[in-house]
Image (tube, rainbow, N blue to C red):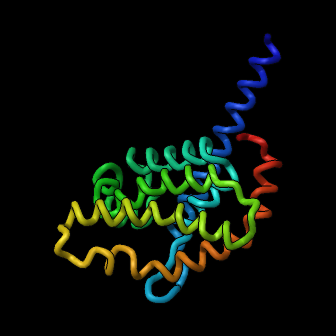
Amino acid sequence: MEAIKKIEISQIVKIFLIAIFGTLLLTISAKIKIPFYPVPMTMQTFVVLLLGITLGPKIGFLTTSLYLFEGIFGLPVFAGTPEKGIGLVYFTGPTMGYLIGFLLATYFAGIFKYDKGIINTFIKLIFSVSLIYILGLLWLGILIGWEKPIFKFGAQPFLLAELFKILLLSILVPTLVKVKKIIKIT
């Protein structure tokens, strides 16, 4: 019985440490801006999908949730913080839909099996990242009004960068699946 408790506690500690590391990756990915056309690119959506692929749906979702809570509670983890505000005020601003979309994207990237080739993988990752944009655009429409060109400002400038990131992830998936098997947490 005591051995079971030790295994459970060690597994919980392992998951917690992995989740903290994942939130650090998300924070770094939010802060680094890579020159790209037509707008600079962050690697947040790349890391969101990477977390789903490598950690699975449950631990990936937990990690992304922890990242969002860190930001809501005032840690400057989001892109544009602290310059554009912090905490709940920033979270409920124009990017809230995208941030909530991170949860769904991580979850779906985690539940998919990646054993049917690169094109199948690419389609699954497109679906996963689309959830970020769908929720983001819905929230933008609610926040600033549907009469504005929501798609033009909230998605179109980022699509080329997203395709690049998803192509890169599609190529890396076989390696990421091996990492998932090594860390054995799902």
User: 171 or 72, which is in the foreground?
Assistant: 171
Viewer-closest of 74 and 161:
161
In the drawing, does residue 107 fall left or right of residue 185? Answer: left
Is residue 170 in sight in this rendering?
A: yes
Q: Position of residue 142 (x, y in %)?
A: 22, 61
Residue 150 in picture, x, y percent from top left: 28, 74
For residue 182, above or below residue 98:
above
Q: Identify the residue shown where x is 79% and y is 54%.
A: 179
The answer, for residue 44, to whether it is visible in the render is no
Residue 111 position in % (x across, y down) = 62, 49
Above or below residue 34? Residue 74 is above
Tell me residue 56's x, y (percent): 66, 47
Q: Most extreme residue toward the bottom, as rendered?
A: 37
Residue sitting farthest toward the top: 1
- 140, above or below 88, in the image: below
Could you tell whether 47 is left or right of 100 in the image? right
Quadrant where the C terminus is found in the figure: top right
Q: How many marks?
A: 0
Quadrant location of the N terminus in the rendered image: top right
* Residue occupying the point 73% across, 73% down: 171
Which residue is at 28% across, 65% downward? 140
Relative side of 149 to 175, left or right: left
Q: Identify the residue at horizontal 68%, vertical 73% (top origin).
A: 119
